Image (cartoon, helix red, strand yellow):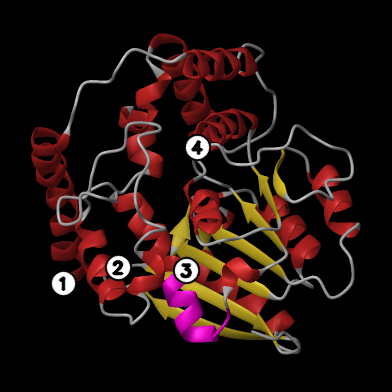
Amino acid sequence: MIGSLIWQFVKWHKILGDALSTRLFDKPLPPPTDREQELVKELRDALLARSHTESLQNWVEFRDQIRCATGQCDPRSFLRWPTVQHAMCLTNSGAVVSEYVALRASGRWSRFAKAVIESPVGNPIRFIYYPLSSGSLLHHCHHVMRFESVTGADLPSSDLVVEFGGGYGSMCRLFHKLNFSGRYFIYDLPEFVALQRYYLKGLGLPVRDGAPDAVTPGIYHFTDLESLQQAIQITRAKTKKTFIATWSLSECQMPLRDRILSIVENFDFFLIAFQNSFCKVDNNAYFAGFQRSTAFRIEWTRMTLRNLPGNHYLFGKSLCANS
C-alpha cells in the first residue's frame, strides 16, 4: 500500500512538475550554430545504417524509436523526446525531491553545487525546486553522494571508469564536472552510443574517436565486449578502477551480465543499481549470488531506495583499495 502511494506521488509530481517547469523556465531555441548543425549531421549519419546488435525486445523497440526521432525531430531537444523521457530522464519525478534534499543535507553540497549546474545541450527540463539543474542530473549526483558516504571513496579520482549502459551521457558528464581526468569507457548499444557522442561533444568534453589502445585520457565508446576487454587489459598496475551500472545490468540478457562482470571483477569500486525483477529474472537472487562469489575481495553494501520501492543500490569496495 505504501509503495503504491509512493509511486503515485513519483508519477504525478513528474507530470505536474514538468508542466510547471516548462511554463516558468522554457525559452525558444535559438537558430542552430554551425557547430550544432555539424553535430546533428554526425548523429544522423551514425544512425543511417541499422545495427544488428542483439538486445532484448523492449530495447529493440526503443532503439527503433531513437532512430525515428533522430530523423524526424530536432536533436537539439532530444531530452524532450517522449522515448528518451520515458527511459532516461527523471526530470521532476517525485523520487528526485528526496534525493535533492539528501544532497543539500549531505555536507557535500559545496562540492556538488557547481557540478549539477545544467547545460542547454539537449534542452533539458529544469527541476522546479532548483532550476539551475535538472532532475536527471541531481539523480545521478545522488548516486555518487550515496556511494561516497557509504564507502568513503572519492569516485571521480578514479583513473579508469567503465560504465555499462551510459544513458545519454549524464553520469559521464557529472564525473568530468567533478574533475575526473582519466579514461571513461562507456559500453552500450550503437544507437545510444551515437546519442551519447552527440551530447558529450556538444558539451565540449574529450570524446575520442576510437584510438585502438585507448591510453589517452578521455571518453571512449564500445559496442563489443572484446574491444572493451582489450582496452581494460592495457591498464597499468595500481590503476584505480570503477564500474558503474545503474539499472542497465539488471535489464540485459544473463550471458551478457555474466560476461561483463567477469571482465570487471578485479575492479576497485562498484556502483550498481537494480530493481527486484526484470523480464521474469529475479535480480535480488542474481546480485546476491554475485556478492557471495566476490565477498573474499569486495566489501559489499546493499541499500533499498525508499523513494523508489523495489529498487536497490549495491555498492562495492575492494578490500585492498585505498579511498
Identify residue for label 4. Answer: 203
- Amino acid at pointer 1: Ile
Q: Earlier in the sequence, mark 1 or mark 2?
A: 1
Q: Residue at x 17, y 64 (%)?
A: 6
- The label shown at residue 144 is 3
Query: Residue 127 in the image: x percent, y percent?
Result: 21, 50
Identify residue for label 2. Answer: 309
- Identify the magenta region: 144-153
Contact (Cβ within 8 Å) of mark 1 with mark 2: yes
Q: Is residue 142 visible?
A: no
- Which is closer to the viewer, label 4 or label 3? 4
Q: Quadrant of residue 30?
A: top left
Q: Quadrant of residue 304?
A: bottom left
Q: Secondary structure at mark 1?
A: helix
Query: Distance of mark 4 from mark 3, alpha carbons?
Result: 21 Å
Identify residue for label 1. Answer: 2
Q: Quadrant of residue 33?
A: top left
